[in-house]
Amino acid sequence: MNIPNSQVSLLDTEWGATEFGARALRSLLGNYPTGVAIVATRTADGRNVGLTINSFASLSLEPPLVLWSLVNHSPNLAVFRDCEYFTISILGCDHQELALHFANPRVENKFQDISVQETPEGIPSIGGAIATLVCANHQQTYLGDHLLMIGQVKRIASIEGRPLVFHGGAFTALHNVQ
Ligand SMILES: Cc1cc2nc3c(=O)[nH]c(=O)nc-3n(C[C@H](O)[C@H](O)[C@H](O)COP(=O)(O)O)c2cc1C
């Protein structure tokens, strides 16, 4: 595909910025659209915990591994680091409110009045998610300001639906390319 001259950016002459702050990097990374998911688990004393993530990615098919990362000042860092299983619920395009709800640290019990399904492993997943993965907590590594979580996929389920998309710091949805 030809790139018009007007789109050959300053990067071509200056080879980009070598000094940049976290905000600039975050803003640049916003050019890469992602899906949106809720990761959830249950504490040893039976409390459901979960949060909205867009760091979810596939890692390996054989064995089946996925990854996501948790900011290292999360109040639930130890819960996820030490859990046996977690679920990843991939949200549909009509789940924006749910995504905001699970991204709000001021909500005390995020699972109250939410459609929750319990997996056979005894952990919560989000009802109505377009895809759900139940993962065994396979490996955890502190990297930079996040805890990298790697899950071994044990169980999968999905329904028809279009995904919620996060792009440029905002929620959006897919549209068909002509
Ligand atoms: C679209 C979106 C994606 C997010 N992705 C992540 C993520 O990948 N990892 C993370 O630690 N926080 C992520 N967050 C922020 C958490 O959802 C937010 O900090 C939440 O309050 C954490 O819940 P807690 O305070 O109950 O732990 C994301 C937020 C939004 C809106």
Image (cartoon, helix red, strand yellow):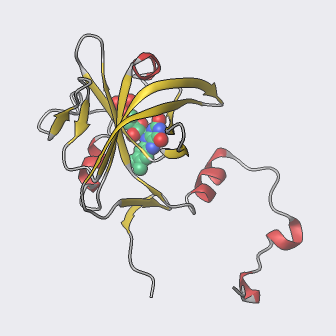
Seen as rendered, the residue at the extreme right is 13
> Is residue 166 shown above or below 101?
below
Percent x, y of residue 132? 31, 44
Residue visible at 24% across and 52% down?
Answer: 97
Seen as rendered, the residue at the extreme top is 45
| Number of callouts | 0
Is residue 17 visible from the viewing direction of this image?
yes
Q: Is residue 29 left or right of residue 133?
A: right
Residue 139 image-quadrant placement: top right
* Quarter that holds the C terminus: bottom left
Q: Nearer the viewer, residue 76 or 153?
A: 153
Is residue 73 visible from the viewing direction of this image?
no
> Is residue 102 shown above or below 109?
below
> Is residue 164 shown above or below 74?
below
Q: Nearer the viewer, residue 79 or 25?
A: 79
Residue visible at 61% across and 24% down?
Answer: 142
Percent x, y of residue 42? 28, 22
Percent x, y of residue 21? 69, 47
Percent x, y of residue 24? 65, 53
> Is residue 51 shown above or below 171?
above
Seen as rendered, the residue at the extreme left is 113
* Quarter that holds the N terminus: bottom right
Q: Nearer the viewer, residue 13 or 91?
A: 91
Q: Is residue 41 left or right of residue 116?
A: right
